[in-house]
Amino acid sequence: MQILIETLYGENGELYATRDGRRILLAKCSPELRIYEHSQRVNILGKPGYGVKTYNSVLTLLPTPETTCAVDVDFLRGISQFEMVCDIQRTDGIFERMKFGNLDPEEIALYGDWTFNISGTPDMIQRLLTL
């Protein structure tokens, strides 16, 4: 079962791409970060029904990101890495600068939303859940 457990909204988002060994500011945007919990029942030690939970995060650039250069399929083919820097407001009202490296593109709609999977450690997921 998959459950959306948290949605965080970033401000002052900057999407960077590495292309030909150079880090390029690719877009300014307002990212939305969704954290999902996946749970499943697993038989362990011959006993049925133990719950096992895993988490993953998805970053979506909303609305269509304001790109700093022309982006087309040929341009995207040359990108070796994506990363995002943005400010996320904590529950105490203070903004915290977050950096998400090595983003894995799930879907890039050239005239729509861009969606990335965030590869992160369990510590990073827990940190995001405490914001």
Image (spheres, rainbow, N blue to C red):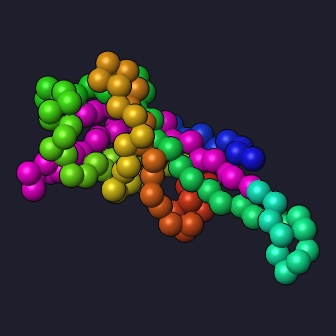
Magenta span has 31? yes
Which one is nearer the viewer's eye here, 114 or 99? 114
Residue 7 is situated, as x and y percent measured from the top left of the image, at 60, 40
Residue 28 is situated, as x and y percent measured from the top left of the image, at 28, 33
Residue 130 is situated, as x and y percent measured from the top left of the image, at 62, 57
Residue furthest front in the image:
46
Quadrant of the image occupied by residue 53: bottom right
Q: Above or below — where is 5 with respect to 101?
A: above
Q: Residue at x 63, y 47 (%)?
A: 36
Tell me: 115 left or right of 43.
left
Quadrant of the image occupied by residue 86: top left
Q: Above or below — where is 127 with respect to 112?
A: below
Q: How many marks?
A: 0
Residue 78 is situated, as x and y percent measured from the top left of the image, at 15, 44
Magenta stretch: dominant secondary structure: strand
Residue furthest bottom in the image:
45
Q: Which residues are magenta?
A: 11-39
Q: Residue at x 59, y 47 (%)?
A: 35
Quadrant of the image occupied by residue 34: top right
Q: Residue at x 25, y 52 (%)?
A: 81
**Res 130 visible:** no
Which one is nearer the viewer's eye here, 91 or 38? 38
**Res 82 visible:** yes
Q: Residue at x 45, y 58 (%)?
A: 119
Which one is nearer the viewer's eye here, 33 or 90? 33
